Each structure stands twice: as C-alpha cells, then as structure tokens.
Amino acid sequence: MCNGCVHKQYPDRGNTCLENGSYLMNYQGCANCHQRDFVLISNKNTEDEDGEEIVTYDHVCKNCDHVIARHEYTFSVVDEYQEYTMLCLLCGKAEDSISVLPDDPRQSAPLF
C-alpha cells in the first residue's frame, strides 16, 4: 500500500461502505509513475466464513500496475441487523448497521 498515492490515509467515510469501486476524490495520483489516471481493481476475492462475507481486492494504477491500496469489505447478519464494514487506505474506513425488519427498532420513538 502506498501513502504517497492518497490525499488522506483511511479517511472517515461515516456509513458509506463500498463493496467495489474506488473513492477517487482521495486519489492524489500514482506515486510510482506520477500519472493521475483510472484506478483498476485486481486480485478480487470473495470468501464466506461462518456467515460473514469478506471481499478483498487491490486498487492498482492503470499505467504501471503499482498497488495503491488493499480494500477489505465485510458483510454479516448479527441478530436482526445487517452489518457492513470497509477498511481501505484509499476508500477509507466505515461501518453501517441496517435492520432487517421493516421498521428499525432503534429508530422508533419511545411511547412514554
């Protein structure tokens, strides 16, 4: 992974978790070939371990195949919630949790 290719390392993305793609606003340009071109995805791998889906891939410079960052995305269902996480030097870090129920119990107002 290359700190010289990004504006900010692991920016906080709130609850925006990317299963694929790249956060190009944080891409400064390739520190190896000094070009700012498309970022390709390579070595994509999806694993399913004990009900948790883990997607990993590399962000790579289109021109010189320099590895910019390693992206990891996870998805799992815990109790009645879908849990998402993302960790990547380029795309940042994020977590999200969404209820699988029609009405999220965390969002309901107390009756009294």
Image: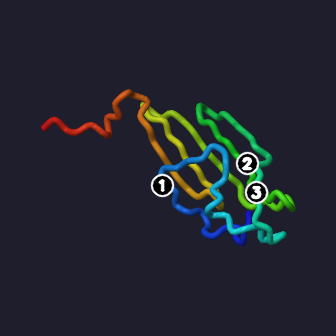
**33 on left or right of 3:** right
Question: In the picture, which quadrant includes the N terminus?
Answer: bottom right
The secondary element bearing badge 1 is classed as loop
Mark 2: amino acid: Tyr
Say which of 110 and 18 sits in front. 18
Name the residue at the front extreme. 37
Question: In the picture, which quadrant includes the C terminus?
Answer: top left
Q: What number is the disc on residue 1? A: none
Report crowding for label 1: few under 14, some 14 to 19, many 20 or more residues within 10 A (C-alpha): few
Where does residue 93 sit, x and y in percent of width and height? 56, 56
Judge whether 18 appears above or below 25 on screen.
above
Query: Which residue position is annotated with label 1?
Result: 14
Where does residue 53 sit, x and y in percent of width and height? 62, 36
Q: Quadrant of residue 50?
A: top right
**Nearest to N terminus: mark 2 or mark 3:** 3
Mark 3: amino acid: Phe
Query: Which residue position is annotated with label 3?
Result: 38
Q: Quadrant of residue 48?
A: top right
Q: CA distance from mark 3 to mark 1?
A: 25 Å
Which of labels 3 and 1 is toward the front? 3
Say which of 81 and 66 sits in front. 66
Query: Which residue position is annotated with label 2?
Result: 57
Judge whether 30 appears above or below 102 on screen.
below
